[in-house]
Amino acid sequence: MSKVSLSAIVPAYNEAHNIVEVLKSVDFCDEVILVDSNSTDNTIELAQPYITKLLTREYVHSASQKNWAIPQAKHEWILLVDADERVTPALREEILTLLETIDDREEVGYWMKRRNFFMGKQIRHSGWKNDRVIRLFKKSKCKYVDKHVHSEIEADGKVGWLENKLLHYKYISIDHHVDKLQRYAGLQARDFDKKVGKITAFHVVIKPCGGVLQNITLYN
């Protein structure tokens, strides 16, 4: 049985320190697209030997960039990987095997668990230990929710699971961590204001406590 073709999409902005390794990890895909948000470092130069298509667009927010890029992929099935993530050899083989029968299945997308790292060390506890993302999906059935930060795929159909994990090198230094927190804070505030409106005691006290309890019971 012939394998279904797959397009990889990698969004990036000033990811010279990451771009070669992430692109190498998706080199099994039939099309590899770099979506660059006008990087000022040498991200594009480093990426050129590994990509089949370059898309450039001024950054709006993550979901907007991805939703803009997805319809421009050549193939129906998409593997979307952020620059700080890596597809392991085991995950690669699982995806390749799945592609042989993927069009005979009812799933329109697949969850992957991520193995998260902080400054090069694996996180073994808390809510950061493992999280899940939909990164393999049909472009005609899936899109990102219109949020500024931490947007997830909204799937029109059944979503399955892959067994092997995606590696996620979340922060490379304390400065990197603080910088992202500062940038995300304002963006998340916009999402929160749009969704919630007036902030109450529930949002300040009860919801955070619920998150802590969830991390204790589910991830440790």
Image (cartoon, rainbow, N blue to C red):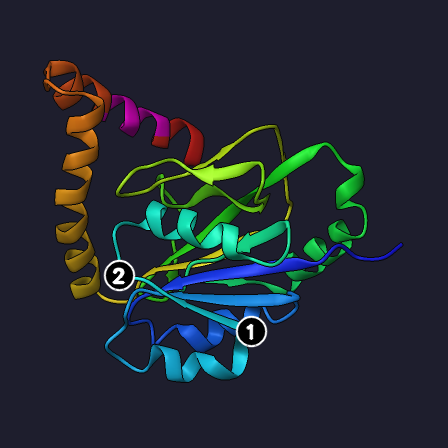
Quadrant assignment, res 218 = top left
Q: State the extent of the magenta-drawn residues as a range.
A: 208-214
> How many residues crowd around disc 2 within 10 Å: few (fewer than 14), some, or many (20 or more)?
few
The reply to whether residue 84 is in sight is: no
The reply to whether residue 189 is in sight is: yes
Q: Nearer the viewer, residue 193 or 206?
A: 193
**Residue 28 placed where, x, y %?**
66, 68
Q: Residue at x 12, y 52 (%)?
A: 182
Quadrant assignment, res 210 = top left
**Residue 198 placed where, x, y %?**
10, 18
- Residue highlighted by disc 2: 58
Residue 17 is left or right of residue 175, and the answer is right
Q: Is residue 119 above or below residue 77?
A: below
Residue 152 is left or right of residue 57, and the answer is right
Q: Residue at x 25, y 52 (%)?
A: 60
Q: Is residue 90 magenta?
A: no
Q: Residue at x 73, y 58 (%)?
A: 96
Q: Secondary structure at mark 1?
A: loop
Dominant secondary structure of the residues highlighted in magenta in the image: helix
- Residue highlighted by disc 1: 52
**Disc nearer the start of the sequence (1/2):** 1
Give the Cα separation between the discs numbered 1 and 2. Answer: 20 Å
Q: Residue at x 38, y 78 (%)?
A: 44
